[in-house]
Amino acid sequence: MRVIAGQLKGRRLMGPENDDVRPTSDRLRETLFNVLGPSISGARVLDAFGGTAAVAIEALSRGAVSATVYEKAPKAAKVAQANIDHCGVADRCTLIRSDFVQSTGTGAFDLVFVDPPYDMTGLDEALAVAASHLAADGRLIFEHRRSRPSPEVIGDRTRVRVLEAGDSALSFYL
């Protein structure tokens, strides 16, 4: 894994130590940020199931002002922190070692990225919590298995686009 573009372009990132974490592929991250384009500049980003923190680091590399990463798995959180430190973004990236759905954190984020385990139970609750963290004009992006349709509406947000790549899909909500 590597940072695709921006200030940290080419920086190598540590991958997961086991199969418990399925990081967003370089190709899918590139697609995501190509769609977001310049809107990422100045954004406050929430990565709800952060894994290796690759999405948050990519956002920071491309001009986001801050990122918050939730990761409850201890081994994955250790990798995420190592990647944050390695990329020198610890001053702009906060890792919260906690379950996102059970979190009591607040904040209005311009971009909320949700990439839960593909077989997660309680997905509707996780998506509702994610939507509650959005700023008024924020975007929610949900990564999911291509074969599992995404909901048309999450909270007060409507799905406006679905992009498919390999076995994965990205659903965009405004």
Image (cartoon, rainbow, N blue to C red):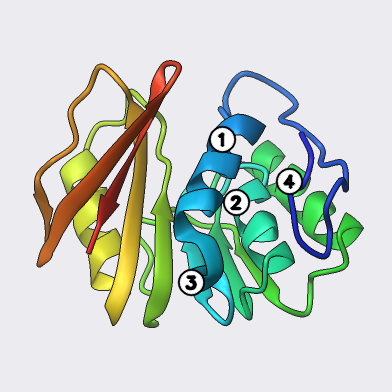
Crowd band around label 2 with a 10 angstrom C-alpha radius: few (<14), some (14–19), many (20+): many
Mark 4 secondary-structure assignment: loop
Is residue 149 at all visible to an observer of this figure? yes
- Amino acid carrying label 3: it is Ser
Q: Are dots 4 and 3 in contact, CB under 8 Å? A: no
Quadrant in the picture for residue 41: bottom right
Depth check, front residue: 49 or 59: 59
Sequence-wise, which precedes: disc 3 or disc 2? Answer: 3
Q: At 48% from the left edge and 65% from the top edge, which residue is drawn?
A: 46
Residue 4 is tagged as 4
- Amino acid carrying label 1: it is Thr
Depth check, front residue: 136 or 132: 136
Q: Quadrant of the N terminus?
A: top right
21 in relation to 40, above or below: above
Q: Are dots 1 and 4 in contact, CB under 8 Å? A: no
- Amino acid carrying label 2: it is Val
Q: Are dots 2 and 1 in contact, CB under 8 Å? A: yes
Q: Are dots 3 and 2 in contact, CB under 8 Å? A: no
Q: Quadrant of the C terminus?
A: bottom left
* 8 sits to left or right of 21: right
- Amino acid carrying label 4: it is Ile
Compute the Cα span from label 4 to label 3. Answer: 17 Å
Compute the Cα span from label 2 to label 4. Answer: 10 Å
Q: Which residue, given by chain and number where applicable, does mark 3 sit on?
A: 39
Compute the Cα span from label 2 to label 1. Answer: 8 Å
Residue 55 is tagged as 2
